[in-house]
Amino acid sequence: MPQSSIQNPQSVVITGASGGIGLALARHYLERGATVAAIARRGELLQTLAAEFPGKVFCYALDVRDASALQQAASDFMSRVGTPDIVIANAGVSVGTLTEYAEDEEVFQHVMDINVLGMVKTFQPFLSGMREARRGTLVGIASVAGFRGLPGSGAYSASKAAAISYLESLRVELHGSGIRVVTLCPGYIQTAMTDLNPYPMPFILQAEDAARRMARIIARGTSFAVVPWQMGAVGWVMRRLPNWLYDRLFASAPHKPRKQFLD
C-alpha cells in the first residue's frame, strides 16, 4: 500500500463521529485536509461539524446497526470521492449490566449489536473497492476492557473482546491484499462515556490527545496498539494474573452504572 495514502489520507470514513473519540478523529483529519464521511445517529451534531469545514464533510445520520443505511452511505461517499483511504469503526456504547436482571438482556443485545456487528457492517461495504484498489486501512476501536472480564461490565467487556478477535481474524483474512487492519484499544479517554464512571481512571487522556496518538499509530500501519501505552502495560499485567488472584483483586471493584433502557 502506498505510504502517502496512509500517512496523508485524502478520504476518511468515521462512525460515531458526533462526539468523543470519533469527533476528535474527524477534526484531526479534517484539519489536515482530508475529506471525511462523518457517520452518527445525531445528525444535528454532524451538521455543526460540516459547517466548520465547508465542502469537506459528508454527513450520514444513521445507526450502525442498519446495514442497508451503511451500504447506501458507503455507495454515496464512494461515488463522490472514490474508495476511502481509511475506514474507522468507532461507534460504540458502554453501560453497566448484570446478568441476574432479566431486563438487562436487552441491554446486552444492544451493546453487542453496536460494538461488534456495527463494526462488521461498517467495514463490509468498502472491502470490495479496497480489494480492487489493493489499498486501504480498516481501523477498529476496541478497548482494554476487552482484555479481561470486568465486574458489572459483562456486555461491554464481552463486546470489546469479541471486537479484538474479530479484527484479528479480519487482518489474517486480508493478509497480502494490500489492505491493513489496525486494532486500537483505548484506555480511559475523557468523553461523555467515561464521565459516568464512579471510579478512578488512571492515565486518562483528553479526546484530542488520544486522536493525535491514534492517527500516528494508523499512519504507521501498526496492527495492534493500546492508547495510552501505559494502559497497555496495565493490560499486559492483567492478562497474566492467575484467575484466583484476578478474582480476589477485582471482585469488589466499583461497577459502571446500569441503564435499563438505551435510546
Image: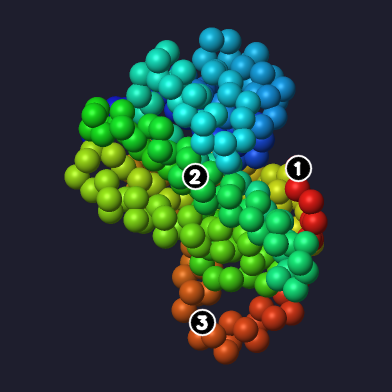
Residue found at the far left of this picture: 176
Task: Give the SS element for disc 3.
Answer: loop
The Cα atoms of the two marked residues, 2 and 3, are separated by: 30 Å
Do residues under tags 3 and 1 come within 8 Å of each other at their CB atoms? no
Q: Is residue 206 above or below residue 24?
A: below
Instruction: Determine whether, in the image, residue 31 is placed left or right of residue 96.
Output: left
Identify the residue under disc 3.
241
The Cα atoms of the two marked residues, 1 and 2, are separated by: 19 Å
Q: Callout 1, which amino acid?
A: Asp
Q: Position of residue 139 (x, y in %)?
A: 43, 42
Q: Around disc 1, counting alpha carbons within 10 Å, would you say few (fewer than 14), some (14 to 19), or many (20 or more)?
A: few
Instruction: Determine whether, in the image, residue 163 is placed left or right of residue 258.
Output: left
Identify the residue under disc 1.
263
Q: Around disc 3, counting alpha carbons within 10 Å, would you say few (fewer than 14), some (14 to 19), or many (20 or more)?
A: few
| Foreground label between 3 and 1 | 1
Identify the residue under disc 2.
119
Residue 256 seen anywhere in this rendered image of the structure: no
Q: Callout 3, which amino acid?
A: Leu
The residue located at (71%, 52%) in the rendering is: 194
The answer to which of marks 3 and 1 sits earlier in the sequence is 3
